Image (cartoon, helix red, strand yellow):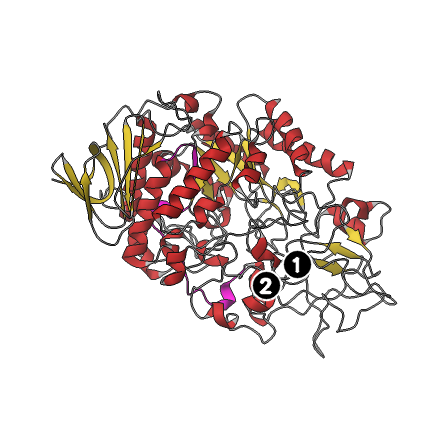
Amino acid sequence: MTHESTAVGLASAYSNATTASGDWWRDAVIYQVYVRSFADSDGDGIGDLRGVRSRLPHLARLGVDAVWLTPFYVSPQADGGYDVADYRAVDPLFGDLADADELVRAAHELGLRVIVDVVPNHTSEQHPWFRAALAGEPGARERYLFRRGRGADGSLPPNDWESIFGGPAWTRVADGEWYLHLFAPEQPDLDWTHPEVTAEFDSVLRFWLDLGVDGFRIDVAHGMVKADGLPDIGRGAQATLIGAEPLPFFDQDGVHEIHRSWRRLLDSYEGARIGVAEAWAPSSERLALYVRPDELHQAFNFRFLNCPWDPAAMRTVIDESLSATTAVGAPTTWVLSNHDVVRHVTRYGGGPRGLARARAAAMLMLSLPGSAYLYQGEELGLPEVSDLPPASRQDPAFRRGRRQQIPVPAGAPAPGPATPGIIAPRPGEPPTRPGAGIGNGPEADAGPAPEQPLAPQAHAPTQPQAGASTGPAPETQGQTGPEAEAGIGPQARACCGPEAETGAGAGPDLLTAPEAEGQDGLRDGCRVPIPWAGAEPPYGFGPAGSWLPQPPEWAGLSVAAQTGDPHSTLELYRAALELRRAMPGLGAPGAGPSPDPSGMRWLPSPDGVLLFTRPGFACTLNTRPEPVELPAPGRPVLSSAPVETDGRTVRLPPDSCTWWAF
């Protein structure tokens, strides 16, 4: 017989024991909403909170347990909202505080929990604290990492640290001091040894917990504490070392005391509020430290996302991840895509082969012990949009070679053009307002003027812009060929067309990826607004257009087009999530009567095939490009592609995953 999926009319009212208890997060499926690209309610082409609320029924029908919202706070949008100017207010671009409150209430009515981003490593340059620091207010600079420069005249940066977005991690201000920014210059790093910083973020967390949110995704959770003395690293291309080697600005032991204090705060609220670490660490064991019993509840498992399409590598990552988190009594998390990486349909090869692998990988992920994260649109099988015009791109790293010019007050020292980290303006080029060349409008085409020393004055407000998460992006950017097969790791070069090789064809001083040695600046391709319905853009995204152009071929990938089609990726996800809830052997670690804490056992299998069991359940993954025959491990209940079985043997299709009950 040929079998693709079953009607999932099982005990759908059943929910795994942990989901029904206070430990809901141990096996939760959490859906990431990139707010500006999810749904637009007011026709400005940018998604907003009312738009998200209007589409919550889709998420409830999909079968997820919680929604994670990317930043919607007041921000000049130099980095897609990860540069926060006011942590307690909603940016008018996305609505207001009443919209946030109504969204949380509506989600709860549908049985969905809500997780929001918090950005504690840095603020916006337009945060009142940083504006006070530039204005010379006594003690204001102590909240940030200001330092004197090196060299006889202080014209060299304080150390050799590089920005994740490329270039030096230091910017000099008008009086000669330098401030640290591990990301964009518009994102100055906070000094977490200052008691006012600790108190402020305790207050921010309480503000949103009191509004009713169920937890926080902590941006750059590994970055708030820097090594004493801010020592040099001694080598370049530092972004490529993240998650691979110890670094003095990431994964310092001091961050754990911050997370312990936040865990105590979260535990003081009813309803199992959680903290989720976006953390990079050199090993699974170091990552597990973030989820010890007195720290955070979850940490993203980027090793799984970066894993190549290779069964041995997958098994190694799965085993090591489960071992590390089990040792500290925490669940493992699994994720395939997010707003910082090329969508996994494209990473796995693109086209029909990439889609087949992506569907199979999703089923594998959803069958593993622990919690899974879905990125908006992956349930539709969306590929990366690789041909965005340069003028539309808004990732801040895309134009990392061009910094904004801010006028220097009369009499202030002006470093010369040879000063490292400071670029002199081109002759005759006028000053531009902060953010120009990154955001919308005609400035984006012209590009901003180069960087000048920051003056101690208020900055002009910027146009709404889009950008990238400040978390170090595991840019597994392979599209086809050897890179896709190899599973390129963090900060790998984007291969989404000639832009990656040429610097995207913008102005002559736009740096190429090798020159900048930071992120590639091509992350907009995974942020294109998703299609809901209709034959033409914006496919129901909103009443008008969309801030990034949508491909014409997306009409057939919309929610409306795929709903009811038993062969669609959307219906595959819906069936998998319903089965995940219905089958007791899926989801949480320790579910079922197994001596293995993960409830999972590997069984012998042919080359290229993974086979494991959990209580009453088996999963087969065929990574080979041809069918494979083996004894049927049970009764097939769901498959990413049609399988042929006579009840005794099974013929697994290439690049496919099948779930079995026994």
Q: Decide if residue 559 is in sight here.
A: no
Q: Is residue 378 rendered to the left or right of residue 286?
A: left
Using the image, tell me which numbered label, if any, was put on residue 162: 1
Q: Decide if residue 25 is in sight here.
A: yes
Q: Quadrant of the C terminus?
A: top left
Residue 248 point in image, percent of width and height: 68, 49
How many numbered marks have been drawn onto this rendered protein structure?
2
Which residue type does callout 1 highlight? Glu
- Specify whether residue 371 is painted magenta: yes
Image: magenta residue range = 368-394
Name the residue: 61% across, 28% down: 263
Look at mark 2 in the image and give the residue it sits on.
Answer: 517
Name the residue: 36% across, 54% down: 348
Residue 477 point in image, percent of width and height: 45, 58
556 over 504 or under it: above or below = above
From the viewer's side, name the closer residue of 514 and 86.
514
Which residue type does callout 2 highlight? Glu
Q: Quadrant of the N terminus?
A: top left
